[in-house]
Amino acid sequence: MRRDQAGPEAGVRTGGGIHPLLAGRFSPSRFDPDAVVDDGALGLLLEAARWAPSAGNSQPWGFFVSRRGEPGHGRVVRHLAASSARWATDAGLLVVTSARRYVDDTPLLYSEFADYDLGQAVAHMTLQAEALGLASHQFRAFDLEGLTEELRPLPGWEIISMIALGRAAEEPPEGRDRRSVADLLSAPWTPEA
Ligand SMILES: Cc1cc2nc3c(=O)[nH]c(=O)nc-3n(C[C@H](O)[C@H](O)[C@H](O)COP(=O)(O)O)c2cc1C
């Protein structure tokens, strides 16, 4: 697998010329414990997710949001793994993401693209966060069973991931690892005979 190393100025260094919002995004492992995600910012993050594309416009996403100091925050924080609790607890906002995978209590798929579409909604949300000067760190390091018992998603809905959002309290790490564009184009395909 061919890889590129990219530093903080990845968009420039790689010559890709990608948008600064994309080039500047990284997942911090330290958040400012005093920074607040205000109502306006929270509303814009959700509005950005709402406008993501989805298969058949099925919009199979849903979120549980809680900010530091709000009652819902404790309900989520107690299910964090030790590895994520170290930094996610300080973030101003925790988002639990959920996808509607099934039609209610049946084994029928609500949409075969439910997780894919949720990912797009989250990408919208995280880029809107960048535009607001907020960083985000998506993660799976939490007790899925415990959080599911806590939030009790309705039939058909499943918790997929979490996102910590807030003010980054560190710079992007040096030497971020990415596969090369050439590898993206070649890795999946059988070479022509
Ligand atoms: C679905 C998903 C799950 C992730 N789970 C974790 C996690 O459990 N713990 C963690 O520290 N980071 C987690 N991450 C963050 C990735 O490790 C991170 O995005 C990746 O290393 C690339 O780094 P960057 O976001 O700074 O570019 C997750 C990211 C995604 C999209």
Image (spheres, rainbow, N blue to C red):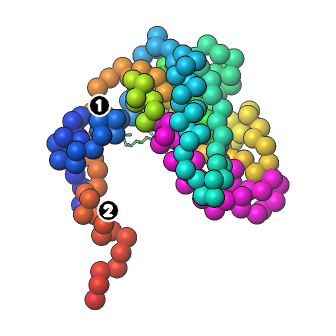
Q: Which residue is mark 2?
A: 184
Q: Quadrant of the image for the N terminus?
A: bottom left
Q: Amino acid at mark 1?
A: Pro
Instruction: In the displayed orientation, state which residue is furthest to the top.
Output: 34
Q: Looking at the rendered structure, which numbered label has been put on residue 172? A: 1
Relative image position of residue 167 (x, y in whole percent)? 42, 20
Is residue 102 found left or right of 180 in the rendered image? right
Residue drawn at x 24%, y 34% as measured from the top left: 8
Q: Is residue 5 visible?
A: no
Q: Is mark 1 within 8 Å of ligand 1?
A: yes
Relative image position of residue 38 (x, y in whole percent)? 54, 16
Q: Quadrant of the image for the C terminus?
A: bottom left
Reply yes or no: does residue 175 show up in magenta: no
Report how many numbered discs are placed on residues in the image: 2
In the rendered structure, which disc, 1 or 2, sits on the residue that comes first in sequence? 1
In the structure shown, which secondary structural element does the residue marked by tag 2 occupy?
Answer: helix
The magenta region covers: 99-126
Residues tagged 1 and 2 counted as in contact (Cβ below 8 A):
no
Q: Nearer the viewer, residue 143 or 175?
A: 175
Q: Looking at the rendered structure, which numbered label has been put on residue 2? A: none
Is residue 183 found left or right of 62 in the rendered image? left
Residue drawn at x 27%, y 33% as measured from the top left: 173
